[in-house]
Image (cartoon, grey):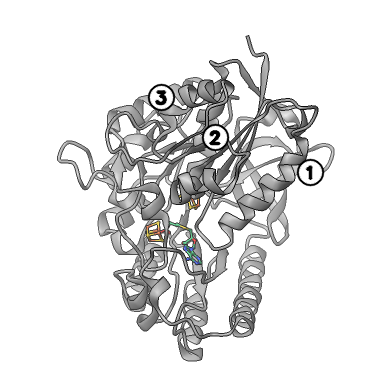
Amino acid sequence: MLDKLLYIETFGCQMNVNDSERIVTMLADLGYAATNDPASSDMILLNTCSVRGGAEEKVYRRLANLRIYKRDGKKQIIAVGGCVAQQEGEELLRKLPYLDLVIGTHNLHLLPEMVRGAERGERRSETTFIDNDQRLDLFPSIKGESRLSRFVTVMQGCDNFCSYCIVPFVRGREISRRSADILSEIRQLVDEGVREVILLGQNVNSYGLKSEHEPSFPELLHQVAAIDGINRVRFTTSHPKDMSDELIACFADVPKLSGQIHLPAQSGSDAVLKLMGRGYTRDSYLAKVRKLKALRPDIVFTGDIIVGFPGETEADFEQTLSLMEEVRYIDLFSFVYSPRPGTKAAELVDDLSRTVKMARLDRLMELQRRHTREISQTYIGSVMSVLVEGEGKLPGQVSGKADIGRIVNFTGDTSLIGSFVDVKIAKAYPNSLLGEL
Ligand code: SAH
Ligand code: SF4
Ligand code: F3S
């Protein structure tokens, strides 16, 4: 019987979103139903991200705010999970006397007993890395509402240790899931109505490299695409250094593979890329982009850029802008560098002023807005295959995603939901396209 209420807030990347889904499923067995209302909940869990600075403070602030709900003398279990939990561990329990549970990224399997303990008033922190089959975070929850497009985790963790990044410290070493499990999960998803899967990992390109028995990522892509009922396959994220010719070839050989790729460059300057420990140069990155464009002329790129990395000169920054001009991303996630505890870059002298960093970010975003606008305009008049996923923003409209990952809204009946339809693009907005069936 579901006689208790669980309120979860999820920050950060899809890994956390998957973990939250799994937590909801696990705690249902203990009688907790998910709620959107923290005030009436019996348990509050923040699933946190620590990829950029201020993450810990944000958690403290949010918990302080949520605690106003702990009223009527009613006992509410307060828990912190995810990457800040992994990073801070027991320290969080010491700092926050009202906190009951701290659960690290590899310890989800302990959550039920931790919650039972907390119901009896026990406080506990578990953040040990476990690299064996006990780890539940490897296996995304596949219960829940049936959706048309689902993320499927293929690997977790990261071995790259880019000098600025905390992910390897809070998610642990790279570990690939067995391909047999991935494929059977996808078949099950097809039975539930899923038509598109997004293969997920911190660096999917190195999938299977540590195991003789598993296929390479390009081989896995072929196997996934061969599953009847799956109409479209995407993946995220790929590290440019591991973008092999074999994987590039998939963009020509696997028709179900989406024509959009997220390929974070981080910087366009060789000097900065070297300090970041990214393992590729500007030229080798651009060579891969050119190969992809040659094989799939309509391919679109998205990416991540960090501005204001320690020592980034004006000339380095200009290199980043010129890289953007060459690639022409349809969308770009841009971040001001933020030092993370324990990372190599945190030891570098960071003497750029905040004003300079923000001014660079502004210039970069301005350029990106222009590129997004110009690329989107070229779609007007073209016909795109759209997987209709739900109702649109306006009455009478439905909405879905095109092969290139853009949202497309058009006038149409909700009976179209779940099917692929051809839509002629009439108008381009910064974040979506408007079309006609
Ligand atoms: N595994 C993915 C992304 C991980 S984090 C990859 O390698 O591409 C997502 C993005 O956050 C990164 O691509 C990077 O652009 C940004 N990021 C990571 N650490 C950062 C830091 N310390 N400061 C600013 N941005 C950071
Ligand atoms: Fe972080 Fe680099 Fe790993 Fe991405 S590849 S998660 S940026 S260390
Ligand atoms: Fe954030 Fe952890 Fe993901 S740090 S980006 S939630 S792996």
Counting from the top left corner in percent of width and height, residue 120 is at: 56, 20
| In contact (CB < 8 Å): disc 1 and disc 2 | no
Q: Earlier in the sequence, mark 1 or mark 2?
A: 2
Q: Determine crowd level at label 1: few under 14, some 14-19, many 20+ residues with C-alpha closer than 10 A.
A: few
Residue assigned mark 2: 20
Residue assigned mark 1: 393
Question: On residue 187, which mark appears?
Answer: 3
Q: Quadrant of residue 96?
A: top right
Left or right: residue 308 versus residue 375 is left
Residue 141 vertical placement versus 130 (above, below): above
Q: Compute the Cα span from label 2 to label 3.
A: 23 Å
Left or right: residue 368 versus residue 307 is right
Question: On residue 115, which mark appears?
Answer: none
Label 2 SS: helix
- The count of marks equals 3
Counting from the top left corner in percent of width and height, residue 6 is at: 65, 27
Q: Which residue is at the front of the view, 58 or 251?
A: 58
Q: Residue at x 35, y 70 (%)?
A: 344
Counting from the top left corner in percent of width and height, residue 42 is at: 68, 25
Ligand 2 quadrant in view: bottom left
Residue 177 shows in this picture: yes
Q: Earlier in the sequence, mark 1 or mark 3?
A: 3
Counting from the top left corner in percent of width and height, residue 236 is at: 44, 50
- Name the front one of labels 2 and 3: 2
User: The N terminus appears in which quarter of the rendering?
Assistant: top right
Question: Which amino acid, mark 2?
Answer: Ser
Q: Compute the Cα span from label 1 to label 3.
A: 32 Å
Q: Residue at x 43, y 41 (%)?
A: 105
Question: Which amino acid, mark 1?
Answer: Lys
